[in-house]
Image (tube, rainbow, N blue to C red):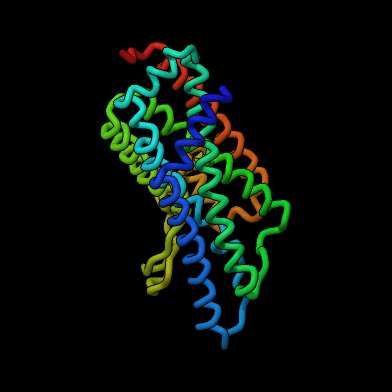
Amino acid sequence: MRNLLSANFFRLRKSALFWGVMVLMLLLGAGFTLQRVWEQVAYAEFGGLYYIDEAFFNYTMIIGIVMAVFIPLFFGTEHSDGTIRNKLTVGHSRVSVYLAHVLTAATVALLFCLTYILAVLSVGVPLLNGGIERPLPTFLLNLLGSLVLAAAYSALFTLVTLNVRQKAISAVACILGTLAIIFASFYVRARLSEPETWFNYGTDETGEVAMLEYPNDRYLRGTERAVYEFIYDFLPMTQSMQYYSSYSKEHTPQTQRMIAYAALISTLSTGAGIALFRRKDLK
């Protein structure tokens, strides 16, 4: 396993794709933070505090898409170049080969996130007039959860990449799968955001025109709402939305559930990936 990881990290050091994405994350972190600095300057006459964590957790909305592109492009060539077959030929087991790829992908995701965070802190600490809006324990829990989520994305895309021989097909599958999750996440969030009632002008009992309250037929209730709330906490992209949103600053039990779900996604994806990879014909 150590030799496999060393070989993967050696490839990373030589990879233009890896360093290009690192620079991209650095620029995105600095850019989002500078946007908040510009708003602070532009609206200085109105006062107000501009907090670091308003830009800090933006990477949670980016890392899934970044890894959906990076993992197939970086690992996808190992099938066509025969690298995986060579690793098995010299005596490495399929399980150790697969786990080395999962650990490498998770490490890369963490490095991308930490690069973004470093950029935010480097720009935000000296220039923004607010500190951290979330309470520190909640902030640290959100940070932990977002990094576990990044590892879950890595496990999902490694599952696809190592079990699809063609790099182009695996890349398309990862990107389309991510887009499908994004659309599903926005739909779930929109349904949960439906108000229980809505208001419109109508005629009351006296015949006067007034603003009346009507029940909303699209409002989710009972078991149906519980199912949507589970999906909202379980899907990776809806987790990203919640870490990004300031609404997560006081929802510690919900954050703990999301961390457990992300860890479960990583475990199930890795287990399924190993099971498929062990049966895969690599000739």
In the rendered image, the vertical position of residue 203 relative to residue 48, given as above or below = above
Q: Position of residue 105 (x, y in %)?
A: 49, 35
Look at 62% across and 49% down and name the residue there: 143
The image quadrant that residue 82 belongs to is top left
In the rendered image, is residue 230 in sight? no
The image quadrant that residue 188 belongs to is top left
Q: Where is the N terminus found, in terms of image quarters?
A: top right
Query: In front here: 200 or 184?
Result: 184
Q: Position of residue 233 (x, y in %)?
A: 53, 41
Q: Position of residue 24 (x, y in %)?
A: 43, 56
Q: Position of residue 52 (x, y in %)?
A: 61, 65
In the rendered image, is residue 52 in sight? yes
Look at 46% across and 15% down and name the residue there: 94
Total numbered labels: 0
10 relative position to 161: left or right = right
Look at 45% across and 36% down and name the residue there: 11
Look at 39% across and 47% down and name the residue there: 16
Q: Where is the C terminus found, in terms of image quarters?
A: top left
In the rendered image, the vertical position of residue 235 relative to residue 204, given as above or below = above
Query: In front here: 126 or 57?
Result: 126
In the rendered image, the vertical position of residue 105 relative to residue 206, given as above or below = above
Query: In front here: 204 or 155?
Result: 155
In the rendered image, the vertical position of residue 34 relative to residue 103, given as above or below = below
